[in-house]
């Protein structure tokens, strides 16, 4: 039994620990893996990107839980889907966009069976009162059909995360890319873009904020310390970096969703 947690809760407060406590009370043999709890508050784009980067590396049968939920306590739906041999439990707000676009959804349901929740449900902490107990029950074999009514996968929200994860398109004049944007900024200040790495050889320059990069490299070691570069990161997307520094800081501050300007050169696609 394996459960992953991806949230914007951080580690200052007890929220993550409390969720684990609820899970342990229902499924004491479950292993809980912390994917990340440093998603920017309400950071749907970052959460969707990080989930998409992580879930293919887990075994079939994993229960992936995402609690990045600006609409907590409102009429927004909570959904559970089965795809890629695993189950994903999240608000229906776009955080599942990478899964919905990358794998065929075998089953989707709205999570509405209150008998599976904690007896008292807070309007502000569904992570504890809904997501944690439902995840624990899924990990111990509760079928999706017991969570609530079926949902049409095509009707699930992709939203802004889905649009950005889809990547940019060539501009009308063929000299740039429309819709290039930031997906995330990692701990090192690398700016992860939505540009497919296969386009890397064609990039003449790439600009985010105040940082313009004209050097495309394979590794950080190909440039001198403090130099800016673009390269293909481990998820197959173009990243903007500064060797031994922070590209996000040099750019003057960058956030998921920010636009990127790309000028294409004469390289081979």
Image (spheres, helix red, strand yellow):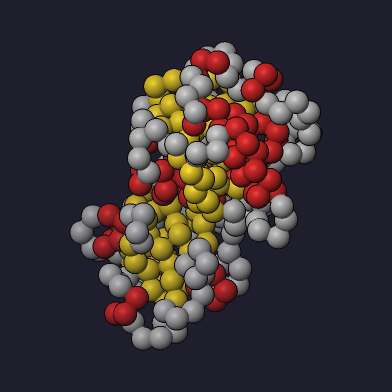
Tell me: 113 left or right of 13. Answer: left
Q: Position of residue 200 (x, y in %)?
A: 30, 61
Q: Is 46 or 173 nearer to us in this picture?
A: 46
Q: Residue at x 65, y 49 (%)?
A: 16
Q: Quadrant of residue 213?
A: bottom left
Q: Position of residue 214 (x, y in %)?
A: 37, 73
Q: Position of residue 151 (x, y in %)?
A: 53, 17
Q: Residue at x 41, y 43 (%)?
A: 55
Question: Is 205 located above or below residue 42 in the figure?
Answer: below
Q: Residue at x 34, y 76 (%)?
A: 220
Tell me: 113 left or right of 73. Answer: left
Image quadrant where one finds the C terminus: bottom left
Tag count = 0
Q: Residue at x 47, y 67 (%)?
A: 190
Q: Quadrant of residue 72?
A: top right
Q: Is 208 or 10 nearer to us in this picture?
A: 10
* Residue 97 visible, this angle: no
Q: Is 50 or 194 nearer to us in this picture?
A: 50
Question: Is 40 located above or below residue 220 in the figure?
Answer: above
Question: Is 157 located above or below residue 255 in the figure?
Answer: above
Tell me: 200 left or right of 133. Answer: left
Tell me: 105 left or right of 20. Answer: left
**In this view, which residue lies farthest toward the left?**
268
Image quadrant where one finds the N terminus: top left
């Amino acid at each position: 039994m394996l459960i992953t947690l991806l949230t914007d809760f951080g580690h200052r407060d007890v929220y993550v620990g409390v969720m684990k406590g609820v899970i342990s009370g229902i499924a004491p043999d479950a292993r809980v893996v912390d994917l990340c709890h440093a998603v920017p508050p309400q950071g749907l784009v970052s959460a969707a990107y990080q989930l998409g980067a992580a879930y293919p590396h887990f075994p079939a049968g994993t229960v992936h839980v995402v609690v990045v939920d600006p609409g907590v306590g409102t009429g927004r739906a909570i959904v559970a889907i089965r795809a890629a041999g695993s189950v994903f439990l999240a608000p229906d707000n776009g955080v599942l966009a990478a899964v919905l676009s990358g794998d065929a959804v075998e089953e989707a349901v709205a999570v509405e069976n209150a008998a599976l929740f904690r007896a008292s449900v807070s309007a502000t902490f569904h992570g504890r009162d809904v997501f944690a107990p439902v995840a624990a029950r899924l990990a111990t074999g509760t079928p999706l059909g017991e969570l609530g009514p079926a949902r049409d996968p095509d009707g699930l929200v992709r939203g802004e995360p889905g649009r950005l994860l889809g990547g940019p398109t060539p501009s009308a004049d063929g000299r740039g890319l429309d819709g290039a944007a930031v997906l995330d900024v990692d701990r090192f200040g690398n700016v992860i873009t939505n540009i497919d790495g296969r386009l890397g050889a064609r990039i003449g320059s790439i600009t985010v904020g105040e940082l313009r990069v004209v050097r495309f490299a394979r590794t950080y070691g190909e440039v001198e310390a403090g130099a800016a570069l673009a390269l293909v990161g481990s998820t197959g997307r173009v990243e903007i970096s500064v060797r031994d520094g922070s590209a996000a800081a040099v750019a003057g501050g960058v956030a998921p969703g920010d636009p990127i300007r790309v000028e294409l050169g004469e390289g081979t696609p």
